[in-house]
C-alpha cells in the first residue's frame, strides 16, 4: 500500500462523493491507486431528510446510518474512507480538524485531489469543503506548518472540482469529461447504497448519460456511454498540447 499512488477525495458530506465522483474513484481504484475519501460531515442535518421522517430519530442515529451507507459505497468503489464529523449546516472546522486535514496531504501525498466547486448558493457547506481543501493543500507544502505527517508535501497535486448539483447556478463549466463507462455499474451500486437520498439516483444516472454524450461529441470516441464532468483549478504543466 505504501508504494501506491494516491487520489484524495474531500467530500463535504457523507454522500457527495458518490453522486459526483464515484466513477473517478472506481476508475482509479481499478488502476491500482489508493483512493482515500475524507468526509468532513455526515450531512446529518441537511442531507438526511428521509431519516428524519422516521419517528424518534436522533442526530446520533442519523450519523450512524450515514456512516454505514457511505462506508458501504466506498467499499463498492474500492476506496478507503474517513469521517471528520465537523458538524453540518454549518460545517464548523476546529484548528485541530484543519491540522488533521493537512496531515491527510502529508501522510498520503496525493497525486490527484478531487473536491467541490467554488460556489454553491444552495449549500454553503460545499464551498466550505473547497476552501478547506485548498488551504490544506497549501499548508501541507509549508515546512513550518505544525502538522505531524511524514514531512511536508513537496509537490503541488492538481485539484479537480467535481460537478455540483445545479452547475449553472454554481458557475461550473466542465473542462474535463472523464470516461467512466468501464466502471459505471460500480457507480450505480454505490448510488443505490445511499438509501437516505435514494431520490438522487435517477438524476445522476441521467447526468452521467448526458455527460457521456458530450464526451463523445468532444472526442469522437463513440464507445463512451457515461462520463463525469470536472473543472481544473490550477494550470496543467505539460510539454505537449492535447
Image (cartoon, rainbow, N blue to C red):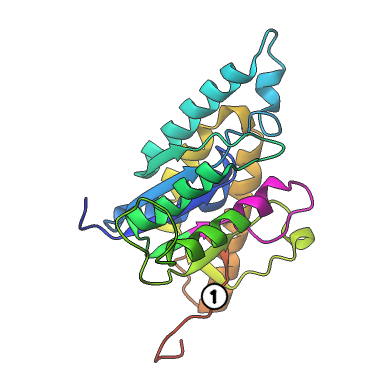
- Membership of 148 in magenta stretch: no
For residue 139, say whether it is visible: yes
- Membership of 128 in magenta stretch: yes
Seen at 45% across and 50% down, the residue is: 184
Residue under numbered circle 1? 234
For residue 225, say whether it is visible: no
- What is the secondary structure assignment of the residue under circle 1? loop
Whole-percent x, y for residue 238 in the image: 41, 87
Q: As rendered, which of 95 and 55 lies closer to the eye?
A: 95
Considering only vertical position in the picture, is 28 above or below 100? Answer: below
Q: What stretch is highlighted in magenta?
A: 114-130
Considering only vertical position in the picture, is 19 above or below 72? Answer: below
Whole-percent x, y for residue 160 in the image: 53, 65
Q: Can you tell which quarter of the image residue 185 is in?
A: top left
Considering only vertical position in the picture, is 135 above or below 158? Answer: above
Whole-percent x, y for residue 142 in the image: 44, 67
Q: As rendered, which of 221 and 179 lies closer to the eye?
A: 179
Relative horizontal placement of residue 77, taking residue 193 as reference (left or right): left
Relative horizontal placement of residue 32, taking residue 235 as reference (left or right): left
Amino acid at each position: 500500500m505504501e508504494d501506491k499512488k494516491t487520489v484524495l477525495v474531500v467530500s463535504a458530506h457523507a454522500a457527495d462523493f458518490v453522486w459526483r465522483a464515484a466513477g473517478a474513484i472506481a476508475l482509479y481504484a481499478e488502476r491500482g491507486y489508493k483512493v482515500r475519501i475524507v468526509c468532513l460531515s455526515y450531512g446529518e442535518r441537511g442531507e438526511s431528510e428521509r431519516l428524519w421522517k422516521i419517528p424518534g430519530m436522533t442526530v446520533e442515529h442519523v450519523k450512524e446510518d450515514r456512516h454505514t451507507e457511505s462506508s458501504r459505497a466506498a467499499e463498492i468503489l474500492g476506496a478507503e474512507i474517513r469521517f471528520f464529523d465537523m458538524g453540518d449546516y454549518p460545517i464548523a472546522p476546529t484548528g485541530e480538524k484543519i491540522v488533521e486535514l493537512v496531515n491527510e496531504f502529508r501522510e498520503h501525498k496525493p497525486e490527484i485531489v478531487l473536491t467541490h466547486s467554488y460556489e454553491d448558493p444552495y449549500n454553503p457547506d460545499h464551498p466550505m469543503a473547497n476552501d478547506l481543501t485548498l488551504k490544506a493543500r497549501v499548508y501541507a507544502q509549508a515546512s513550518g506548518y505544525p502538522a505531524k505527517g511524514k514531512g511536508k508535501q513537496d509537490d503541488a497535486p492538481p485539484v479537480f472540482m467535481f460537478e455540483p448539483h445545479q452547475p449553472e447556478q454554481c458557475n461550473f463549466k466542465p473542462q474535463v469529461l472523464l470516461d467512466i463507462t468501464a466502471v459505471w455499474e460500480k457507480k450505480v451500486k454505490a448510488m443505490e447504497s445511499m438509501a437516505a437520498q435514494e431520490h438522487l439516483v435517477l438524476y445522476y444516472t441521467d447526468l452521467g448519460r448526458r455527460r457521456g454524450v458530450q464526451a463523445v461529441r468532444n472526442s469522437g470516441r463513440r464507445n463512451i456511454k457515461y462520463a463525469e464532468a470536472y473543472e481544473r483549478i490550477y494550470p496543467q504543466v505539460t510539454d505537449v498540447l492535447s
